[in-house]
Structures are given as structure tokens and as C-alpha cells.
Image: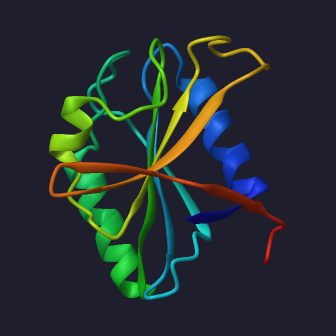
């Protein structure tokens, strides 16, 4: 189960809407061994594509060094789907390399960059196996 604050969900959805029609991507870091997402880190989709996302390798290296310095890990790895449901694609599954991370997908297919309904789902992806998990929204600091 992913326990995450409403503020962090709002941040991910705002990023997905802002980057629409391209996919948005980013990380929410948290303290090592805590499983608690705390620090929102929006990233640039280097692919600048409505159907694919790719972290810029320089930005990603910088992020991992920063997380190491802060004793953090990527608790959530998120991206948006702009025209399809919030479910990992074959490419998403193949590129999932953090077995302890929650992979969150946000679909903006209904409203695009506008306010309105969105779909948000979380998954664990380990060795190509996808398992959906419950998302529990908690108050900030819970």
C-alpha cells in the first residue's frame, strides 16, 4: 500500500496537467527504509513525447547523488499518460528498475491540462510483474 499526502498527489497531478500533451515524470524521495514519500522532485521529460517519458541522464545522476547526500531513496516514481488509462505500458514495465519503488501513473486523458477528473493508480513492478496496490491519502505529516 502507498501512503501519500494529498499535497504530493496535488503536486503530481499539477505537473501532469502542466506538461500535457506530453507525458510528465518525476520522483518523490523519502528517507531510506521509511517507505514514506516526502520530497517532490519534478523532472523534465527528455523525450518530450505524448506517448513516452525518459529522464534526462544528467538530471537523474544529479538526483541520485542528491538523494545519497540526504540519505533518501526514490519512494515514488511517477509519470503521466495523456491518452490512455493509468496502467503501465510494456515499455514502462521493461524500464522499471527500482523494485522497492511505488510506480504511480496519472492519466490526464479526460481533461488534459484543465481542472477536472483524473485517474491515479499505484503499482509495484518487480522483474516484469505488475501488481496494483491501494493508495491511502493521508494528511501531511501522517
Apparent side of residue 80 relative to residue 90 in the rendered image (left or right): right
The residue nearer to you, when weighing 43 against 82, is 82
Vertical placement of 30 versus 109: above or below?
below
Name the residue: 29% across, 43% down.
55
Query: On the picture, is 106 further left or further right than 140?
Result: left
Q: Residue at x 38, y 64 (%)?
A: 101
Q: Residue at x 81, y 69 (%)?
A: 140
78, 46: nearer the viewer:
78
x and y percentages locating residue 56 in the rendered image: 26, 44
Q: Residue furthest right?
A: 139
Across and down, in percent, residue 66 comes to 38, 75
Determine which quarter of the picture holds residue 87: top left
Judge from the rendering whether residue 127 lies leftward or rightward of residue 68; answer left or right.
left
| Quadrant including the C terminus | bottom right
Q: Is residue 8 left or right of residue 50?
A: right
Residue 61, percent across and down? 24, 63
Q: Is residue 69 above or below residue 36?
A: below
**Colour convention of the picture:** rainbow
Amino acid at each position: 500500500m502507498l501512503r501519500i499526502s494529498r499535497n504530493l498527489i496535488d503536486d503530481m497531478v499539477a505537473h501532469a496537467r502542466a506538461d500535457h500533451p506530453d507525458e510528465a515524470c518525476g520522483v518523490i524521495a523519502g528517507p531510506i527504509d521509511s517507505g514514506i514519500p516526502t520530497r517532490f522532485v519534478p523532472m523534465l521529460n527528455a523525450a518530450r513525447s505524448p506517448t513516452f517519458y525518459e529522464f534526462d541522464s544528467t538530471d537523474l545522476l544529479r538526483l541520485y547523488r542528491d538523494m545519497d547526500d540526504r540519505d533518501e531513496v526514490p519512494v515514488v516514481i511517477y509519470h503521466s499518460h495523456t491518452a490512455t488509462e493509468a496502467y503501465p505500458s510494456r515499455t514502462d514495465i521493461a524500464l522499471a528498475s527500482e523494485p522497492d519503488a511505488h510506480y504511480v501513473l496519472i492519466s490526464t486523458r479526460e481533461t488534459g491540462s484543465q481542472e477536472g477528473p483524473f485517474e491515479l493508480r499505484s503499482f509495484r513492478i518487480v522483474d516484469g510483474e505488475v501488481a496494483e496496490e491501494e493508495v491511502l491519502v493521508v494528511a501531511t505529516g501522517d
